[in-house]
Amino acid sequence: MTVALENTTTTTIHGDRVSLLRVLGPAHVWALGVGIVLVGEFTGWNFSADKGGALAALIVCWVVGLLYTSVAMIDSEVTSTVAAAGGQYAQAKHIVGPLMAFNVALFLVFAYTMLEVSDAILLGDTIVAKAGVEGLTHNSFIAATIVVLAWLNYRGVLMTLNVNFVITAIAYVSIVILFFSVSPWTQGAVLKLNELVTPGNALPYGWIGVIAAFQFGIWYYLGIEGTTQAAEEVRSPARSLPYGTMAGMITLLIAAAMTWYVCASLMPWEYLGITYYPLWDAGKLTGSPLLENLLFIATLLAALASANGCINDAARAWFSLGRDRYLPSWFSAVHPKYRTPYRSILFLLPIALAFAFIADLNQAITFSILSGVLQYTFMSINIMMFRKKWPLGSIRRGYTHPFHPLPAIVLFCLCVVTFFAIFLGFGSQLIAMVAFYFLISLWFHFYRYKFVRRGDQFTMPWPKPQGY
Amino acid sequence: MSRYTPPEQSKAGQVFDIAVVVVAIFVALWLPLKLGLAGAAKSIDALDAKTWEALGQNPTMASIWEKLGYTPETAHDVIQNRFHYIIDWPTLIIMAAVLIGYFVFLFRASDREYRDVINEKFDDK
């Protein structure tokens, strides 16, 4: 029998307390972050070329990189201090309040579940395109991907992230191999950037296209903040989380720059903006069967690694909601043998399957991006409140980020620009999604909150916040 | 301050709440798809002459399109399918109002709840 205990990380089985296992190191944190995000180089970022042209995709690659550097800096400070499962959810609970925490957990669950859906669609479509068989659909591949990865997550976090580490590394190396195989220092032989990105087509929509491109520019890095979800399963959170997150950001910035350079030098922006697999296409266009097959396999591996990490993160956020009774406590059970939040994993499985069958790739990506940007907006305000309620020196921080409040201001401004970018072309989807969060917040505040134990929401050994 | 004791939720109540959340998720994510509100707002600027030159493609671009299996006719709908960035001010104002209203409610209601948490946590000591 499994009995969930609220407000603890544990489950009681036959009188024994069972908790999530602390087995992960910095390499796992890196693998969790980069594993989730790297698929963004294999698909999704290129839709920014559709919204603004090839040069716009490069500009947002760097500017959105700045947004995520701010995210990583802010997140490293708060997470190294609030090291609890749920990541940003636990941060919101201790710094802003229960309703914000409830919303942040939903942002996380939707961002990761829709990213998982996007990964499964990419994987299915890539296999179907490679097979080239008339009448073959992606549905069976999508279902198999989601179910098998959910089973892997059900079985244990260490095995899950060990698998992620290996497949992420292979996918990353494939980008490096592609980059050096096309003689990046020479134009004209394989790469033809000057002939494909010309003064006449570099910014086909002008500067408004650059702003519009921010929407999918987010996809270069979306999910790196997922490293914090494993806070309760990391051996040394104060060291491993900042180190793994920052290393992940550097890895991704390099991969994003290489990816843009190769892809923009091999295909016209109109095609780059609509293809589902730009790196695989780049492999094909080099004329090398070896590179084509390598990038095909890497696309599948990147999608698998990302979906795997997403299931891990979404389930932990959902688990945290159940544990604190923000949702029924039934979700807070830990598996007696595998020590995983198995009910949360199983609950989110059919939701992912359903949307994988009814949404297309750019719709699923937009759902994910929307939840991500709402979360980053919260993070920019959250760090200001954190520093105000507990100024430096009042509590022990594992890491203190420099230049405060500049990263928070940069992050907030870039979030406002990204909301405007989503409005340009996807405005109705944005309004519908925010309306949902508004209504579910009313439900929580006026009904569900009565089941929450007030004082138990604050578990850190900190002094009373200033101003309260 | 006295410690707040929440009511125990029955199994039926838990099942009902789970159902509410599932329905809310599907309404939020599925309805925009069903109503055609999701996805890119693009339209095709059709051209009469379907040649690589008319489509604005130089010889290098044309050779790559052909390598990818396209002809000027099949590439026409891809190349000419464009965004038209006209700012619809009423929609933009609605979007901004919804977003600002949402965040204002979120922070104000959270603060009220947070004061309960802090009072109970620190007044117990």
Image (tube, helix red, strand yellow):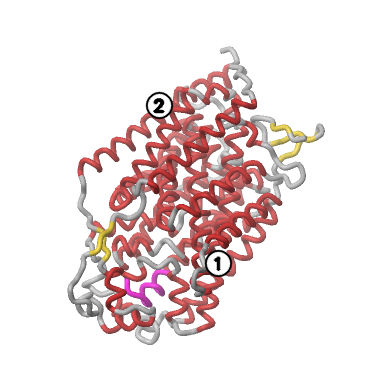
Q: Quadrant of residue A309?
A: bottom right
Q: Main secondary structure of the magenta part?
A: helix
Identify which residue is drawn at 21% across, 49% down: B87
- Is residue A35 something one can see in this rendering? no
Residue A439: % across, % down: 41, 32
Q: Residue furthest top?
A: B2
Q: Secondary structure at mark 2?
A: helix
Q: Give the residue at mark 1.
A: A300
What segment is highlighted magenta in the picture?
A: A258-269
Q: Is residue A152 left or right of residue A327?
A: right
The percent position of residue A91, horizontal first and vertical second, equals 52, 37
Q: Are marks 2 and 1 on the same chain?
A: no
Which of the labelled discs sits on residue B108, or is there none? 2
- Front residue of A141 and A14: A141
| Mark 2 residue crowding within 10 angstroms, few (<14) / some (14–19) / many (20+) | some
Image mark 1: chain = A
Image disc number at residue A262: none
**Where's residue A71, x and y in %?**
45, 49
How packed is label 1: few (under 14 Cα within 10 Å), some, or many (20 or more)? many
Label 1: element kind = helix
Query: What kind of residue is marked 2?
Result: Arg
Residue B88 colored in magenta in the image: no
The chain that hosts pointer 2 is B
Q: What is the three-letter code of the residue carrying label 1? A: Leu
A258 vs A9, left or right, is: left
Q: Which residue is found at the position 34% from the left and 38% from the top?
A: B99
Residue A267 part of the magenta-drawn span: yes
Q: Residue furthest bottom?
A: A189
Q: Residue at x 33, y 77 (%)?
A: A193
